[in-house]
Image (tube, coloured by chain):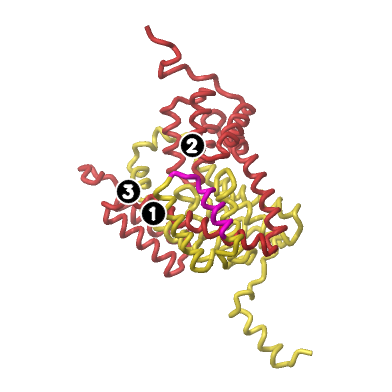
Amino acid sequence: MVPPIVSIALPMALPLVAVACTPAPLSDPGQLLQVLGEFLSLSLFSLGGGNTLLAEYHHLAVDRFCWLSPRQFADLYALAEAAPGPSSMIVGLLGLGAAWREGPGWALLTAVTAELAILLPSTLVMVVACLSWKRLEHAPLRVAFERAMGPITLGILFSVGLKILHSADTDAPGVGVSIAVCVLMLRSRLSPLWYMAVAGGLGALGLINR
Amino acid sequence: MTDSREQPSSPLAPRPSLLSLFLGMLQVALSAFGGGLSAWSQRIVVEQRRWVSNEQFLTGLTVARLFPGPNQINMAVYIGADFHGLVGALVAMAGMLLVPFSLLMALGVLYFEVHELPAVDRLLAGVVAAAAGMALSMGFKILDQYWKDGMALVLAGAVFLALSVFHARLIPVVLVSGPLAMVWYWPRAGGSRS
């Protein structure tokens, strides 16, 4: 039997513990709409090709809705980078993880829904942009927008890089590998799949841990 | 005498149907499995199928990079919308995503099935370290072009601080910094800043 003092203290202590966060159930329609709203609005802020949203995905999936642990998030990011196709498909993986407890069928449906939510708004903007590009091309608004978004994207990408490094949470050799890969990405044109394969091998041998 | 094959402006093909738009994008996505999506897309859409001229293609790339959304998807949307409006855009996007997305979902299902196995977790620890390096390189990759623009570095620094140190959310940060930066970079009649 749990002593009364502990049973009172426990709920109060819970918010301080990292695992206190309970996964948001997607079967609740209100919750589902809220999640959809988050992805739909983020879509319009996917500057610089979409990688700028990674830290926000982390915030939603790990901190806010508690679908994934930081470690799982880092795993899914690596998976999306390793697989062919746009890496922004990580949103599908987040959807998969969000509903995994409710069975693979429901998880896949959630994955497709999440991916559509992140793609549709930016697609609509893109269609309008294509149809009115002739007028937009030399407009001061367009020129200012393009120049302004560059530095902002730069700041966001550094923040995203740090966030992913933080959630990867490897030991010192692992961080060394991260830094080496970062330098290689800038200096060499070799496919990053090689780096992932070699680092995966080092991990399997027990040389990189987390 | 000129060889007709070498003429730069070979006539464009007639407007593709929705089906051939879908198949064309499927072909681009499949060809690019080893990487180099933009190059493949140019080869197939411009040279092979002759749907758009090279000039149109380059304009498309500019538009795709400028507006929100993944660049490759935006490029497909640009081509699709040009021929069939919104429906064309969605069909092109579906063609581009169908195979890679299905594959990624298969990988994802596999991941959630096996990620708790110690051997898999050890392997992933390494892969994740490499992936973190890739994420870290994204900012450095575009840093070069802003070295001589002090204001750009100040802006980027402020955005970084707001997000990483003060833990502000992305949308409010962009909504505040975006208009400020646009005022600063608004093209002036004198054209002193280019």
Q: Residues within 10 Å of mark 2 (few under 14, many from 20)?
A: some
- Tell me how far mark 1 sits from mark 2, CA to CA: 21 Å
Task: Please indicate whether residue A84 sits to the left or right of residue B42 in the image.
Answer: right
Tell me what hue chain B is rendered in.
red
Chain appearing in yellow on the rendered image: A
Mark 1 or mark 2, which has the lower sequence index? Answer: 2
Asked if the residues shown at circle 1 and circle 2 are in contact, with their CB atoms under 8 angstroms apart, the answer is: no
Q: x, y (%) of residue B127?
A: 56, 57
Does A124 appear in magenta? no
| Left or right, A194 with reference to B95 | left
Q: Name which residue lies at 44% across and 44% down.
A: A189
Disc 1 from disc 3: Cα separation: 10 Å
Residue A40, position as x, y percentages in the image: 57, 52
Q: Name the one closer to the observer, B104 or A208.
A: A208
Label of residue A110 in the image: none
Q: Amino acid at mark 2?
A: Ser
Q: Give residue A32's quadrant in the image.
A: bottom right
Where residue A58 sits, quadrant-wise, is bottom right
| Residue A199 counted in the magenta span | yes
- Check whether the beta carbons of the residues at disc 2 and disc 3 lie within 8 A of each other: no
- Identify the residue at image location x=44%, y=64%: B163
Residue marked by disc 2: B38
The range drawn in magenta is A189-202
Q: Position of residue B38 (x, y in %)?
A: 48, 36
Could you tell me if residue B147 is visible in this image?
A: yes
First in sequence: mark 1 vs mark 3: 1
- Which residue was labeled with disc 3? B145
Mark 1 is on which residue type?
Phe
Determine the residue positioned at 62% across, 31% down: B22
Q: Secondary structure at mark 2?
A: helix
